[in-house]
Image (cartoon, coloured by chain):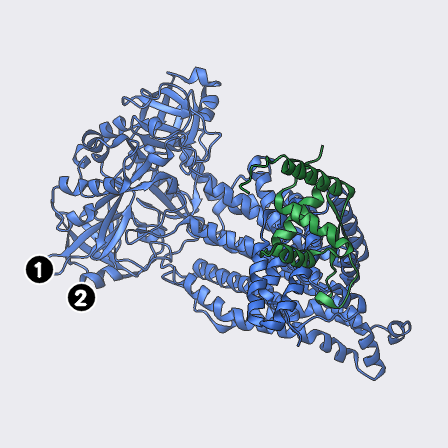
Amino acid sequence: MKSNPPRLPLKFLRWFCREDYLEEFEGDLIEMFEELHEQSPAKARLKFTWDVLRHVRWKFIKSISTKLPVNKGAMFRHHLLLTYRNARRHKSSFIINLIGLSTGLAAALLIYLWVYDEVSIDQFHGKQDRLYQVMRNISSQPGELTSSEYNSDLLAPALREEVPEIEYVVPVDFEDCGGILTVDNNNVQATGAIAGKDFFKVFSFPLIRGDRDQVLKGTNSIVISEQLALLFFGSVEDAINKPILFDQEDYEGLYNVSGVFSTTGYKSSEQFDFLITYDLFLARRNPEYINWGSNSMHVYLTLQEGTELARFNDKIKGFVRERFQVDNEPQGADWVGRLFLRPYSRKYLYSHYENGVQAGGRIDYIRLFSIIALLILLIACINFMNLSTAQASRKLKQVGIKKVIGANRRTLIYQHVGEALILTFLASCLAIILVYLLIPGFNSMTDKQLGLTLEGNFIFGVLIITLFTGLLSGSYPAFYLSRFKPMEILKGKFSSSIGELWTRKGLVVFQFCISILLIVSVSVMYQQIDFVQSENLGYKKDNVIVFDRQQKLYDNLEVFLAEVNNLPGVESSSVIEDQVTDISGNTGVYSVQGHTSNEIPPRMYEAVVGYDFIETLSIEMSDGRSFSRQFSDESSKIILNEMAVEVLGITDPVGTVIRWKRQDKEVIGVTKNFHGQSLYEEIKPMAILHAPDETTKILVRIQSGTERATISELQDVYNSYYPGLPFEFQFLDDEYRALYVSEQRIAMLFRYFAGIAIIISCLGLFGLASFSAERRLKEIGIRKILGSTNFGIVSLLSRDFFLMIIMANAITLPVSYLLSRKWLNNFAYSIDLTWWYFIGAGLSALLIGLLTVGLQTYKAAYVNPVKCLRDE
Amino acid sequence: MLNHSLGEFQELVLLIVATLKDEAYGVSILKNLEKETGKKFNISAIHMALKRMEEKGFVESTFGGITNEREGRRKKYYVITSLGRSVLDQQYEIRTKLYHKIPNTSIN
């Protein structure tokens, strides 16, 4: 009877025992086993196992250091040589791999640079981990929370007084403070911010002149940027204590430069050229507004070290609510809201809140593009894997011989991974050159100032990406090739198994899935953006220019507008408080006089405008009239949109008196609904109020065709108020387009990345097709002799690839439908998804794929059968 | 100088290797040792002793030819070296010398 020793202990022995002792030990154990087996098989097994276990001794264990000495340098040179020879012998696949990997790497590197820049914004503040912004959750509608950055004027001082856990707290207004700075007839339009005195203690903006404690005190101080100092005074030193004239509605006056800060060496989401003081803000503010119900300021603070955030949030939750006196508004207490802290370092990337809960923001784009970078790299790696495994037969003899000579699996794996790494390294050199060439274009697309500097982080990024790509693309072929048994290879018994074929096909399908997904995304995005641009907004956005109403235009508005209206190319002009494309600054509670229902009166958005607003924007009226200079006392009148009429539930709107903030207003007209916000939002009930004094922007409708001449005439009128200052304006349609700038950017980037993904996938397909055509050359020859047509051969060779792309379509189209649906749900108004977006994308992928394969196979099909059958 | 110490168990194994002459390999050493001493040993202990003594230069080893026994694994034969032999001699000398020095005070 043949007796085999138990397998598991034997395996174990082979695993741990050093090679030079193994045969002797194994032999002795087996001999003893066989002898005992004659008497008692069970006992023999037991004893064998026991004996194996007893051999686990330090001296007998394999160690890494007792390996045969390997000349590392020589091996490396050998790998290099082999890589070089392989590249020379198989030029086409080498070039395909190189192009594929380098484009993939370049795309990934660009995305890496972008992501790195994004995540490093606002990360330079020294007190980073204790720096927070005070936010407020307001319930604007029942059951719905809105998170606001704005807080009361009184909040910062009160927090400073009453909450000991706070180290410093500072009120800041980064907006609403731009204007013209003047020194000796030198005018500069600059953006400014209002900041409390501890600004430079809370934030780490570098103050290069002036005392941190003093620069933002008093009503007379201004802190300017280095650039402004150089521009006005020639040097930073000379700027201190010099006067600057500031021309702006609220803060007009002469200020003394108390400090200078630097704007270089850090990345901040907030950009400002100068700072004026909070004391000034309070001094100039209408005292009526300084109350707990105001919301004018961002409030930032640093906590004392060791303060627990959750407990602190709990403590200040009701801080404002307790102090707020419920005055004229019944829901007042609700919209005062509850306070909470948001880490300042998260402000830029995690800005979006939904119903009071953090829900993404820019981080979504970072994630999206990181995933795309990964997918593109993966596609490039798959090309390499597929080509190397498909061409394994070329390398088999080499592997066989090496194994016979004594290479173990590990050396072979090292060799092939090494080959992949060398290739990836070459590709990354090419990729860096590509990135260098592409970066200006990429910067203008993403509105960034990325540079290709050889800093630590960039080199680190390149190294990580290169290593990752090399290891990923080298690993599968390495394990695949090193697995073959030398005997079978050398006897020529090699055949690829079904499983390998499926892996290869699966990888191709995967590549095309990603490509199709990207094509669908691009087409859906472009359709939606197109829809958004061409959608009838309810007003005409063409030929309208918008510019800021500066101080002198406040004092002389009517005169200025009369002068503007007299210009031959001007059709109409008006003023508005908000941006036309985003009327969301003010809301108020309205009720119809006489209605005494128990219902909560609706909250409506307010557009605060001057005369001729409806005419200037060409908004259609459905009833009544617009504000006109022919009537006096227009400020007691109101115009509603149809949505507002519906919400208020009035049947005969014109003439109805509506109550708003203790005032009665008579409805004089109703407009058709128009989009006062981006198409992300539904059309809201809107009240149009007449209060020219509160407006901040001037709108001018220009006759089409006369834009250039009219604008230069407008400039002359403007310069009669502000000599020498450039006339800065924007077209309304540009302003509208700017609402979707991030979508447009992403669509554009998507288009390029989709292109890259398709190109790389097709390169791989091209390589595979040419290889399979080459392998089947004899078969093609025989088929042709037997009467097969060229078309027959092309279809024979293309059929597999055709099926693969069809399969990729079948997998991806439903997925892409769901993803598109999800994206479009962000918009209140969106395109309908029709089948041809998907079929179109699928067909185009199929077409591109077949074209690639067809070219190769056509070449193969046209071969002269004599040529390929002659030598055997 | 190399380590010339020889433990008790190693000495026994070395003696067996010497007596078996050309037929000393793992299993035969184990069997003879058990027969001579009447005790049970584990094969791994024999292997350990052999490898230690090989390092010290007391024994030398060579592979035998491939046979049908042991599923084709070759036997490893051990022979005693002259150094091994002289160490054995020394041990023996010391022991007998000491043995003879035992005072003859036995209870008859």
Of all chains in the rendering, the one displayed in green is B
Nearest the eye: A398 or A354: A398
Question: Which residue is located at x 70 percent, y 70 percent?
Answer: A496
Residue A724 x, y percent position in the rendering:
45, 29
Nearest the eye: A398 or A170: A398
Chain letter of the residue beneath label 2 in the structure image: A
Q: Amino acid at mark 1?
A: Thr
Q: Earlier in the sequence, mark 2 or mark 1?
A: 1
| Res. A624 visible in picture | no
Q: Where residue A651 is drawn, which disc sits there?
A: 2
| Left or right, residue A741 beside residue A766 | left
Nearest the eye: A670 or A261: A261
The residue carrying mark 1 is A596
Nearest the eye: A637 or B60: B60
| Left or right, residue A277 beside residue A480 | left
| Left or right, residue A263 beside residue A84 | left
Q: Residues within 10 Å of mark 2 (few under 14, many from 20)?
A: few
Cα distance in 3D space between marks 2 and 1: 16 Å
Q: Where residue A57 is drawn, which disc sits there?
A: none
Q: From what the image shows, is residue A240 above or below residue A855?
A: above
Question: Which residue is located at x 31 percent, y 60 percent?
Answer: A673
Q: Amino acid at mark 2?
A: Thr
Q: Are marks 2 and 1 on the same chain?
A: yes
Residue A866 x, y percent position in the rendering:
90, 75
Chain letter of the residue beneath label 1 in the structure image: A
Q: From what the image shows, is residue B59 above or below residue A804?
A: above
Q: From what the image shows, is residue A498 above or below residue A235?
A: below
SS label for mark 2: loop
